[in-house]
């Protein structure tokens, strides 16, 4: 885990023991996410385009390069190190609770209101600093409220009127989400 208070923010990723310099501005990593989720670009092209996040693109983009980029995107160095037993099953995909594009206006307003940072004009903001600030937005921020509403399970809400109110809010702020065949089958299994 990186200590933000005194350790330098990384400008590289470790690929098989080699430090490979990467771009670090937050805008580039939001663009990275957009590229990963753009279904209009063929997967092979998307993978090839990921080399743009290296300051010196590798001759051959390996799985290790891709994993390193994904770890940087997820800001893994900001998370506490945990000894987690490896699961043989792939992690369950959950519907997204935040969307950089759909929620951009709320994000801009929250950063300006909470941190006095104008994300449109700030010359540079390291991705890890941006992630730390984003993750610690106050509960009353628009972004955190949206995340809560999108992630709360209606089964946890006991009051009928409150459940109805939250269901409407969830519907109003839902992020378009394509379920995989496995997720659709699992959803039907739970209801029949």
Image: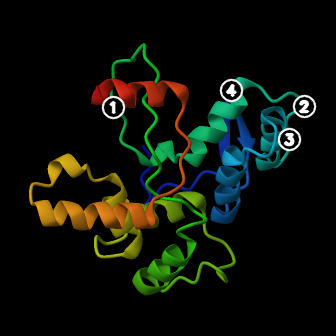
- Which label sits on residue 82? 1
Q: CA distance from mark 1 to mark 4?
A: 21 Å
Residue 160 placed where, x, y %? 12, 60
Q: Earlier in the sequence, mark 3 or mark 4?
A: 3
Decide: marks 3, 2 in contact (CB < 8 A)? yes
Pointer 4 or 2: first along the chain: 2
Q: Residues within 10 Å of mark 4 (few under 14, many from 20)?
A: few
Secondary element at tag 2: loop
Q: Is residue 50 shown above or below 150?
A: above
Q: Residues within 10 Å of mark 2 (few under 14, many from 20)?
A: few
Does 140 sit above or below residue 3?
A: below
Q: Nearer the viewer, residue 170 or 26?
A: 170
Q: Earlier in the sequence, mark 2 or mark 1?
A: 2
Q: Secondary structure at mark 3?
A: loop
Look at mark 2 in the image and give the residue it sits on. Answer: 59
Q: Earlier in the sequence, mark 1 or mark 4?
A: 4
Q: Which badge, 3 or 1, comes first in the chain's sequence?
A: 3
How far, Cα to Cα, is label 4 from label 2?
13 Å
- Measure how far apart labels 3 and 2 are at the Cα level: 7 Å
Checking the image for residue 64, the label placed there is 4
Q: Mark 4 and mark 3 in contact (Cβ < 8 Å)?
A: no
User: Which quadrant would residue 159 be assigned to in this image?
Assistant: bottom left
Side of 146 relative to 37 (left or right) = left
Image quadrant holding the N terminus, namely top left
Label 3 vs label 4: CA separation? Answer: 14 Å
**Residue 157 as seen in the image, left or right of residue 165:** left
Return the residue at label 3.
57
Q: How far is disc 2 from disc 1 in space, using C-alphas?
A: 34 Å
């Amino acid at each position: 885990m990186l200590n933000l208070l005194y350790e330098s923010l990384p400008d590289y990723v470790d690929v098989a023991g080699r430090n490979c310099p990467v771009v670090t501005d937050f805008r580039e990593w939001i663009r990275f996410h957009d590229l990963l989720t753009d279904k209009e670009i063929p997967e092979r092209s998307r993978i090839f385009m990921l080399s743009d996040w290296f300051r010196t693109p590798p001759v051959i983009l390996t799985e290790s390069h891709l994993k390193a980029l994904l770890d940087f995107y997820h800001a893994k160095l900001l998370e506490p190190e945990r000894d987690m037993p490896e699961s043989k099953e792939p992690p369950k995909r959950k519907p997204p609770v935040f969307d950089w594009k759909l929620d951009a206006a709320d994000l801009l307003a929250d950063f300006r209101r909470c941190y006095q940072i104008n994300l449109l004009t700030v010359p540079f903001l390291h991705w890890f600093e941006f992630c730390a600030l984003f993750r610690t937005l106050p509960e009353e921020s628009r972004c955190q409220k949206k995340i809560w509403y999108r992630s709360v399970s209606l089964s946890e809400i006991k009051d009928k009127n409150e459940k109805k109110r939250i269901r409407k809010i969830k519907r109003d702020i839902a992020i378009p989400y394509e379920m995989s065949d496995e997720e659709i089958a699992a959803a039907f299994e739970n209801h029949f």
